[in-house]
Image (tube, rainbow, N blue to C red):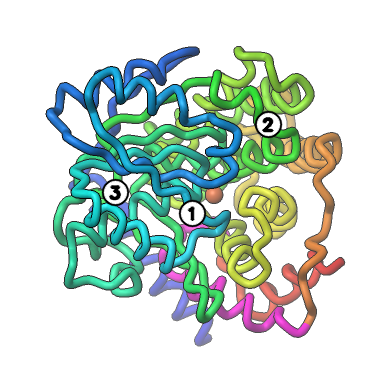
Amino acid sequence: MLFTLQKALYRARQRVMKLSARVVPLPIPGLLTGPGSLDQLAENISVRALKRVLVVSDKVLMQLGLPQRLLLALERRSVAYTVYDDVQPNPTIENVENGVIVYREHGCDGIVAFGGGSAIDCAKIIGARLANRFLSVRSMKGMFRVVLPIPPFFCVPTTAGTGSETTIVAVITDAATHEKFAISDLKLVPKLAVLDPELMVGLPPPITAATGMDALTHAVEAYIGLNGNPFTDENAEKATRLIFANLLEAYQNGTNLEARYNMALASYCAGAAFTRAYVGYVHAIAHNMGGLYSVPHGLANAIILPHVLRFCRAEAEPKLAALAVAAGLGVRGESERELSLRFIEAIEQLNQRMGIPTTIKELRAKDIPLITRRALEEAHPAYPVPRIITEAECEALVSQLLP
Ligand SMILES: [Fe+2]
């Protein structure tokens, strides 16, 4: 009885969110696309009369020399820069605060995120903190809590997965509590994003696999949720089609520029879908695997995705069947039950072919109640999932991930 009432309340909140999304259209970043498109970014920054940008990246990318092309182009355009490369794989509030200090000390007037989801999310929150001195990172947790617009912000993703270059979301970890939480606001969308596949050719196969599965999870969760619209559906289907056609190739042949570009585009489309239609339980659970054990986000999603899809298969059957068709696994007119099962199996096979395990080796049974509580706190009522899960069902689902 209590659960039925709670479910009704969640659904009512989700409907309000769906209606408000129609009233407040989300901004779309300008795009520079294709091999070599990074070279156009410096020019786009210099015409905005920015004096010095903070380039937010990480140590691994700096050692690989990946940002060099951008830095040289900025120099040629007389745009000064300061590199802040202390972003950790699961960025923390401390990473944000240190970035804020560096930005102020060097008198920067714009931000360029250069890296995977961690660098982009950290850069977004650095921007939010800079513009809103009176708000702590924690106090911006949730939806629409960033009051003032962030400094001019540009994004150069070097992985194809997060879609953060087009989303309103940034995920951050509180190192003190190991809690990972999201800040969502229209002001976090960059002015410009660069989809340059040349930056992705050196991405190691395991990272290609995990980030690609993150993008697939965005597309699937946005598509099967209840808050989609024709725009998000089209983007989610396109992303699913591109991922099934290109991810394995990008994993096996990292230098294939066409496969890399198609994955970058898929990630962008999946981002455009989920930032409007939200994600679901896969993300809610995966965020905790990242917060508690530092499991890479995409890897956790890849492992959890088939389990959540089996849980809600019946409710999401027509949608999963449509995704199977988009993925080229069947044709319209076949049994929807068959197609939906085939889609879930194809995800499991894709995982297997890319060496993704079926369990989370860091997961401890004693943590399952905490993971469940935090995951449900994140998901309810924000995520318009096709089937609402109870605490007991969620604990059982997470138990399936035990090594
Ligand atoms: Fe994600």
Q: What amino acid type is highlighted by mark number 1?
A: Val
Q: Main secondary structure of the magenta part?
A: helix
Residue bearing the label numbered 1? 87
> Residue 46 is drawn in which quadrant?
top left
> Residue 191 is drawn in which quadrant?
top left
In the rendered image, the vertical position of residue 379 relative to residue 52, given as above or below: below
In the rendered image, the vertical position of residue 17 relative to residue 319, given as above or below: below
Where residue 76 appears, x then y in whole percent? 29, 18
Q: What is the spatial separation of the Cα atoms under label 1 and label 3, in whole angstroms?
A: 18 Å
Q: What amino acid type is highlighted by mark number 2?
A: Ala
- Asked whether residue 277 is in view, the answer is no
Which element carries disc 1, helix, strand or loop?
A: loop
The answer to whether 61 appears left or right of 171 in the picture is: right
Residue bounds of the magenta highlight: 366-387
Q: Nearer the viewer, mark 1 or mark 2?
A: 1
* Circle 1 crowding by C-alpha within 10 Å: few under 14, some 14–19, many from 20: many
Residue at 52% across, 33% down = 158
Quadrant, the C terminus: bottom right
- Asked whether residue 11 is in view, the answer is yes
Residue bearing the label numbered 3? 188
